[in-house]
Image (cartoon, rainbow, N blue to C red):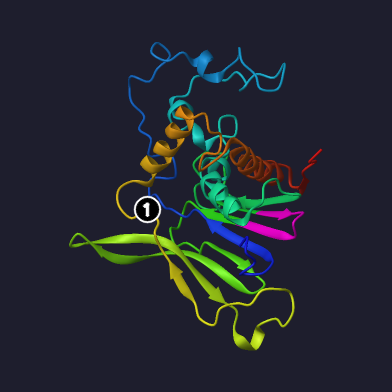
């Protein structure tokens, strides 16, 4: 991307699709020992704390073990799949695109299947436009697990994030990487910089064994030891990604498009 091989980055898309027959986040169990004598309900609600001065974290309400155990289903305690799931995809795709805070965000969706008293939608999409002249689409459902492709579309080519099976030590493992897919010859632009390759190619070398989370933690801890702020996911990147999905929540709940004041 930095070398201009795919041309101007115009659009990217990522997703989070999964399914649970018991209802998303309802799979957290409710037990008899969750009761007012074992749970500090006022502390859980956070009456003594605030992010916005003078506004408690959650309103006072009667004890409810479902809210305690399955708090991700309610706006007072979380942002549903927007904040609790989308942020993971948003962080990595924004890093790959080379963008940070969006100029405009629109959030859509609704509760279309899980009519179980929850607040948060089971289908959601965020569209974020950036001043750099590109757009990011983040979409998903909690009622179907068939995904869309993770990709970045440029004027000259598309980067598609994917994997392939490889043999290592006599075992078949996943090699995670990406494909560079040039635009067709018939539609190849004659101007705009860069010369796309004639054929697609796969670039591997990603984490192929074990849990990728371990590699992220090792990088983070090593950066702490050396006082290096340039982790694989920096605070600045995390703040920009979470701002994007949080704006998606506000847009969905208020029914308006939101603009980011970068000043």
Q: Name the residue rendered at 61%, 12% in the picture.
A: 48
Q: In the rendered image, is residue 145 in sight?
A: yes
Tell me if mark 1 has few (under 14), some (14-19) or many (20+) residues whose alpha carbon lies within 10 angstroms of its own: some
Residue visible at 46% across and 26% down? 68
Picture coordinates of residue 221 (x, y %)? 43, 32
For disc 1, the marked residue is 207
Instruction: Name which residue lies at 66% across and 40% down.
Output: 243
164 over 96 or under it: above or below: below
Q: Is the magenta stretch mostly helix, strand or loop?
A: strand
The magenta-colored residue range is 127-137
Q: Total marks drawn? A: 1
Q: Is residue 170 above or below residue 56?
A: below
Residue 229 lies in the magenta-colored region: no
To which quarter of the image does residue 28 belong? Answer: top left
Q: Nearer the viewer, residue 14 or 42?
A: 14
In percent of width and height, residue 154 lies at: 64, 69
Residue 240's x, y, as percent? 65, 42
Task: Specify the quadrant of the image occupied by residue 60.
Answer: top right
* Quadrant of the image occupied by residue 213: top left
Asked whether residue 130 is drawn in magenta, I would say yes
In the picture, the quarter occupied by the N terminus is: bottom right
Q: Is residue 134 left or right of residue 173?
A: right
Q: Nearer the viewer, residue 20 or 88?
A: 88
Q: Where is residue 148 in the image (x, y as percent from the top left)?
A: 51, 64
């Amino acid at each position: 991307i930095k070398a201009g091989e795919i041309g101007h980055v115009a659009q990217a898309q990522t997703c989070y699709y999964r399914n649970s027959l018991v209802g998303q986040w309802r799979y957290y169990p409710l037990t008899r020992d969750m009761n007012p004598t074992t749970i500090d309900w006022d502390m859980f609600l956070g009456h003594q704390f605030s992010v916005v001065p003078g506004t408690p974290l959650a309103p006072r309400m009667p004890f409810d073990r479902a809210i305690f155990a399955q708090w991700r289903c309610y706006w007072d305690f979380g942002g549903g799949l927007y904040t609790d799931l989308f942020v993971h995809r948003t962080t990595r795709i924004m890093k790959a695109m080379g963008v940070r805070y969006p100029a405009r965000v629109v959030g859509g969706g609704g509760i279309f299947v899980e009519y179980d008293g929850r607040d948060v939608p089971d289908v959601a999409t965020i569209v974020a436009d950036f001043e750099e002249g590109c757009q990011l689409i983040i979409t998903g459902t909690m009622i179907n697990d068939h995904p869309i492709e993770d990709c970045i579309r440029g004027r000259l080519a598309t980067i598609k994030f994917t994997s392939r099976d490889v043999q290592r030590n006599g075992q078949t493992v996943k090699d995670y990487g990406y494909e560079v897919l040039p635009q067709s010859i018939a539609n190849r632009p004659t101007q705009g910089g860069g010369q796309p390759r004639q054929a697609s190619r796969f670039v591997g070398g990603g984490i192929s064994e074990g849990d990728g989370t371990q590699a992220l933690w090792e990088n983070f801890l090593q950066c702490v030891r050396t006082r290096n702020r340039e982790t694989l996911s920096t605070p600045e990147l995390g703040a920009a990604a979470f701002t994007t999905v949080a704006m998606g929540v506000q847009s969905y709940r208020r029914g308006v498009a939101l603009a980011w004041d970068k000043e």
